[in-house]
Image: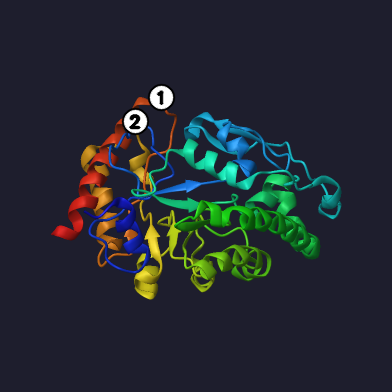
Amino acid sequence: MLTEKQNYLMMLSGEQPEWVPQYTFGPAPGTASTVPVATQMFEPEVISQHRKNNGGKDIWGVNYVATYETGGALIPEPNNFILKDITKWRDIIKAPSLDGINWETMVKKDIERSGIDRKQTALALNLHMGYFQTLMSFMGFSEGLMAMFEEPDEVKDLLNYLCDFYMDVADHCIDLYKPDILTFMDDTAAWANPFISADMYREFLVPCHDRWAKRGRDRGLKMTMHNCGKCEGIIDQLVGMGINLWEPAQTCNNLTAIKAKYGNKLCIAGGWDSSGHLLNDDATEEEIRASVDKSFDMLASGGGFAWFGNFLGPVDDPVTVKKNKILSDYADEKCRSYYKK
């Protein structure tokens, strides 16, 4: 019998899977599926302790705090930026030493603690939240964006410094983890527009991301990219690096045109947003179910689509919990039945 992992990897390979896979960052408030997850993102503990501790300082010194309104998602502590002047980054940003780490022992403990069933779930190895986002976490958006315009060479030097460190980590442990997938992240867009142009994305970020992508290409691994907002202008660059899936693929993008252009070469995880009337407390079960139907009708035909959607909110909010249960139950049913009709 086909496993969730095998079905998901079929989709990433360009085949139509037996059912629509589900992509997730973890269970949303109100959901508790008994089906094994198709894929699980994993970060080496040596570079992600602040995530495991639900906050605190990351390896660069940025303090992260959990936010109640988003169900505990971590954000850099507002107005507590560690880098004021991009030209002084060498004095502030210091990569931690990797000396003395027993990588085999670390990887073994990481995998054991994770509880991942490698037969059922594809392990997606991630290293960081993105070079653009890391720069903004250091400086804030106003100063970070100004630095990219006023001191581009300094920004590039900083990003390359970060990349050198992460690739050092990767080269120590990628072949020990034996991932099925490499994960990329970089939120470079808001809902209405990107923060930077496609040319700036190519100039500043692609060289760093492509170093990770080369490790995936060399090993024949599948690769996924997380980029929220209206980022359709960089899709060509993602495909050019070898990215197989883009998430959360929000509906502010022309997803119909993107699917028509790339077919199953670029899988779309998402295509659903809790926007408009769905955000209201009085959104009905029929309206929530209809929103799922709309996403499937737009993107699921022929494969190349993974369901990815939830209502974001406090974990103890009864309305969020109720709406997520309606959404999750119907999406579970839809995923299993869609290709059988």
Quarter occupied by residue 58: top right
Q: Any mark on residue 166, and which? A: none
First in sequence: mark 1 or mark 2? 1
Give amino acid for label 1: Asp
The correct choice, above or below, for 143 with respect to 244 in the image is above
User: Residue 82's image quarter?
Assistant: top right
Residue linked to disc 1: 316
Is the residue marked by circle 2 packed among few (<14), some (14-19), or many (20+) residues within 10 Å? many
Numbered badge on residue 321: 2
Position of residue 299 in the picture relative to residue 129 (left or right) = left
In percent of width and height, residue 27 lies at 38, 37
- The image position of residue 230, as x and y in percent, is 50, 59
- Given residues 283 and 311, the one toward you in this image is 311
At a point 45% along the width and 60% down the height, the residue shown is 246
Name the amino acid, label 2: Val
Q: Residue at x 41, y 67 (%)?
A: 266
In 3D space, how far apart are the residues under numbered discs 1 and 2 (Cα atoms)? Answer: 7 Å
Badge 2 element: helix
Q: At which x and y percent is residue 106?
A: 59, 42
User: Would you say the residues marked 1 and 2 are in contact, meaning their CB atoms lie under 8 Å apart?
Assistant: yes
Q: Secondary structure at mark 1?
A: loop
How many numbered badges does the structure rendering display?
2
65 or 222, nearer to the observer: 222
Within 10 Å of the Cα at label 1, are there few (<14), some (14-19), or many (20+) other Cα atoms?
few
Percent across and percent down for residue 16 are 27, 66
Residue 217 appears in the figure:
yes
Residue at figure coordinates x 32%, y 35% from the top left? 31
